[in-house]
Amino acid sequence: MVVVIERGTQFLNTIACLRRFINALDDCQVFTSADVSHCGKRSAIDMALTRLVRKGLITRLANGVYMKGDEFDQRPMAVEVAQIKAKRFGKTLFLDTSDIVKSSNSSTETDSEQTVVFTIDGYSSSFKYGKTKVVLQSKNCKRRAKT
């Protein structure tokens, strides 16, 4: 038996699945693209998420991290987005009070770009969160830098 799928049907199913997922979320709740991987192929999910961002149903916080709501809703602090990104890649984020203070200072509206560094286990990475560059630095790198 051959199943014929009309062109665009997969994409429409992906959008419907994403809308159901997003409607079930609370306002300002954060999710990742990995959370919606059950909705279809990666390319269709990326395209559908981009359209939902343009319509204002969701806000893109960082690569692969989204929030239900528009750009006028209160955004989470950089430390929360860093925790979500680290968890998504199976890393552990090590925090102390100075990290949280630095993160909260960077979340206030400033014109200059800032960099916030958090320690993780695993490989280092970085991402942009608004005008803030968030660096997830391997604790092995910090240990080598001290010696």
Image: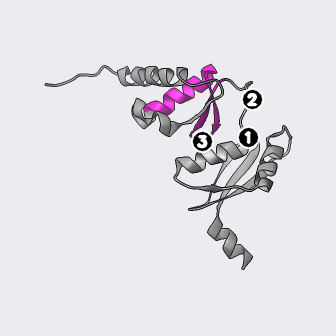
Q: Which residue is mark 1?
A: 77
Split into 4 quadrants, where in the image is the N terminus?
A: top left
For marks 3 and 1, give the CA distance: 16 Å
Classify 131 as above or below 51. below
Which residue appears at 71% of the width and 36% of the height?
76
Residue 46 within the segment the image draws in magenta: yes
Which residue appears at 42% of the width and 25% of the height?
14
Q: Earlier in the sequence, mark 3 or mark 1?
A: 3
Q: Secondary structure at mark 3?
A: loop
Q: From this viewpoint, which residue is outermost toward the bottom?
A: 147
The amino acid type, in three-letter code, at marker 3 is Asn
The amino acid type, in three-letter code, at marker 2 is Gln
Does residue 106 appear to the left or right of 37 in the view shown? right
How is colour applied across the structure in the image? one colour
Point out residue 70 in the picture as x, y percentages from the top left corner.
Answer: 68, 23
Classify 135 as above or below 69. below
Point out residue 4 in the picture as x, y percentages from the top left corner.
Answer: 23, 22
Q: Earlier in the sequence, mark 3 or mark 2?
A: 3
Q: Which residue is mark 3?
A: 63
Split into 4 quadrants, where in the image is the C terminus?
A: bottom right
Q: Residues within 10 Å of mark 1 (few under 14, many from 20)?
A: some
Please name whichever residue, 101 or 51, is drawn nearer the observer in this view of the structure.
101
Does residue 143 appear to the left or right of 39 in the view shown? right
Residue 47 within the segment the image draws in magenta: yes
Q: Which residue is mark 2?
A: 74
Q: Which residues are magenta?
A: 44-69
Q: Secondary structure at mark 2?
A: loop
The amino acid type, in three-letter code, at marker 1 is Met
